[in-house]
Image (tube, coloured by chain):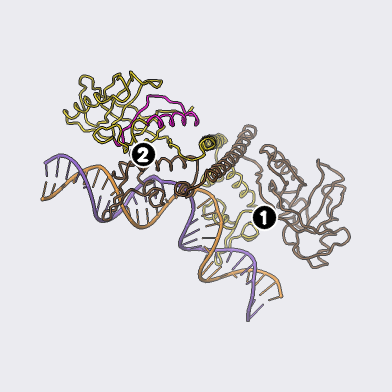
Chain colours: A brown, B yellow, C orange, D purple
Amino acid sequence: MIRIGQFSRISQVSIKTLRFYDEQGLLHPASVDDFTGYRYYTFEQLPRLYRILALKEMGFPLQQIGQLLDEELSPEQLRGMLKARRAEIQAKVQEEMERLARVEARLSQIEQESSMNTIEVVIKKVEPLKVASIRDTIPAYSQQGALWNELEGYLAMQRVRPTGPCFTMYYDEEYKERDVDAEVCEPIEADLAEFRNVKVRTLPGVEVAAAIHRGAYTTLGKAVEAVIRWTEANGYRITGPEREVYIRPGRNGSQADPETVTEIQFPVEKK
Amino acid sequence: MIRIGQFSRISQVSIKTLRFYDEQGLLHPASVDDFTGYRYYTFEQLPRLYRILALKEMGFPLQQIGQLLDEELSPEQLRGMLKARRAEIQAKVQEEMERLARVEARLSQIEQESSMNTIEVVIKKVEPLKVASIRDTIPAYSQQGALWNELEGYLAMQRVRPTGPCFTMYYDEEYKERDVDAEVCEPIEADLAEFRNVKVRTLPGVEVAAAIHRGAYTTLGKAVEAVIRWTEANGYRITGPEREVYIRPGRNGSQADPETVTEIQFPVEKK
DNA sequence: TCTTGACTCTCCCGTTACTGGAGGTTGTAT
DNA sequence: ATACAACCTCCAGTAACGGGAGAGTCAAGA
């Protein structure tokens, strides 16, 4: 019977940790003095402690270690737990590798521009969204006015209010200056009948790479470029049409209002 | 000016998190109503929020993110922080890979033995240790009695008490049945003059791979084998002589006492 | 036998980046 | 006027301990 200090010295496990394992039921001392509360261990407890340490180094949480030690489990179950653990570690490694890629991308970018004037790109999930929309081929990128008038006119007539910021989707694979295949969308909640060009459907939820753009529409291209470059540098693939979300539209529809805030979104998936 | 709910919906950052970032000074709302406490955000705050998210995905802790955002730092400093982060991530990846190796080793072992009757091996640090010792070549592994008698006799005569469990070091590279190069050691604190065969020195601190063995000495070989196999499977290299630490020696020196507890240690380093 | 110093005990707080919930106030639509 | 969603603050919990306060215990030397 030895006291906690000596047990700690032999096993190289801190006294705090030993007390913690006692409390957690992982390793109770062989006996505890009722009056003084002193913990007494025996050398026979070392193998169990070492088993705990070994499992801990494989990354198991203490709770599971308790189970692994105390429950009689079949080799099958044991294999299962080990394989689950392996999968978790692999996921973790993957995650860290992606982090690394982001940092490396930033580093190589800083080599060129030597500052952090970057348009930030983030991954986020977009919920499924019910929208009313009109899709058409328009002569140029900046000439969506007619579509918006038609769509909003119809919504107003039907007394349906949009439930979030409106946006445009661009279906062209490559960048085009003219004859753009565009769809203007207003998110809605209510039921709405389709009418003429106005379609109603629910867009599926997706992951998007997104960047915020502030200022006149003429410089929107920079944000678009930033997102595309980012997806390439960070191992994502673009899987759908670009969305331009008009978070704060220009005053009275102006396309040059410097306080306009737009979000560029590209649906993506990991390569 | 929008309220927290809408800001949360646009940015896909939870309300709780936004409040937390406010509290932490990472992103204060553009204004707060003095009476109601309502937080009001503007769209102009989205870029800052996205910058926070981007840095978070690189794995920076929030505190550092605050610094990165608010302090004017030179590109040099920025590079430094990124490189430090990169190094940390690489270390983390390395660590997880080692975990993976341990789990894989266990899995492949279970394929053969289909249970967990394993001798657990752990890595621990051994502190530098001052010892009195006698080294000699002995006819067989089990015949250390004479050396121990001489060493302990001298210590008793000098009234020096050992300060921890005694141990033997084996210097032979390969396993030998006879003519074993062994050194018996007693850790001491006090100053002690060398005398005849008794040497005094301080062993350097090292990392060791260790396993506990319980029972008669005749089965010690299994523990030794377990440690050696483990080091191979987990990417370590043995860098010094084996130590056999007599944590609980057999009663009156018996080598067959089944309650004997011994620890096998091999100094190691990562490959 | 007493005292000193090392050892041990319990209890509480802090760590990270939030999430969940209780209980109470405010804003908006009908 | 009333419902109900949205918002507020404060508290507790997460994993696996480490640090420290304040009090009790043990072994050895004077």
Labels 2 and 1 positioned on one and the same chain: no
Residue that label 1 marks: B10
Where's the N terminus of chain A, which quadrant? top left
Tell me if C3 is positioned left or right of A73 in this view: left
Q: Which of A228 and C22 is in front in this view?
A: C22
Q: Quadrant of residue B269?
A: top left
Q: Mark 1 lies on which chain?
A: B
2 or 1: mark nearer the eye:
2
Q: Residue B168, relative to residue A207: is it above or below?
A: above
- Mark carried by residue A11: 2
Q: How many marks?
A: 2
Secondary structure state at the residue bearing disc 1: helix
Q: In this rendering, does residue B96 appear at all? A: no
Amino acid at dot 1:
Ile
Q: Which residue is drawn at 81% across and 42% down?
A: A173
Q: Residue B251, relative to residue C11: is it above or below?
A: above
Q: Which of A2 and A80 is in front in this view?
A: A80
Where's the C terminus of chain A, which quadrant? top right
Secondary structure state at the residue bearing disc 2: helix
> Was residue B228 drawn as part of the magenta stretch in this picture?
yes
Q: Where is residue C5 in the image (x, y as percent from the top left)?
A: 22, 43
Magenta residues, as a range? B219-248
Q: Position of residue A208 (x, y in %)?
A: 70, 47
Q: How far apart are marks 2 and 1 (CA)?
A: 53 Å
Q: Which chain carries label 2?
A: A
Q: Residue at x 74, y 48 (%)?
A: A216
Q: How busy is the neighbourhood of tag 1: few (under 14 within 10 Å), some, or many (20 plus)? A: some
Q: Where is residue B235 in the image (x, y as percent from the top left)?
A: 50, 29
Amino acid at dot 2:
Ser
Q: How busy is the neighbourhood of tag 2: few (under 14 within 10 Å), some, or many (20 plus)? A: some
> Was residue B68 drawn as part of the magenta stretch in this picture?
no
Q: Residue D5, relative to residue A265: is it above or below?
A: below
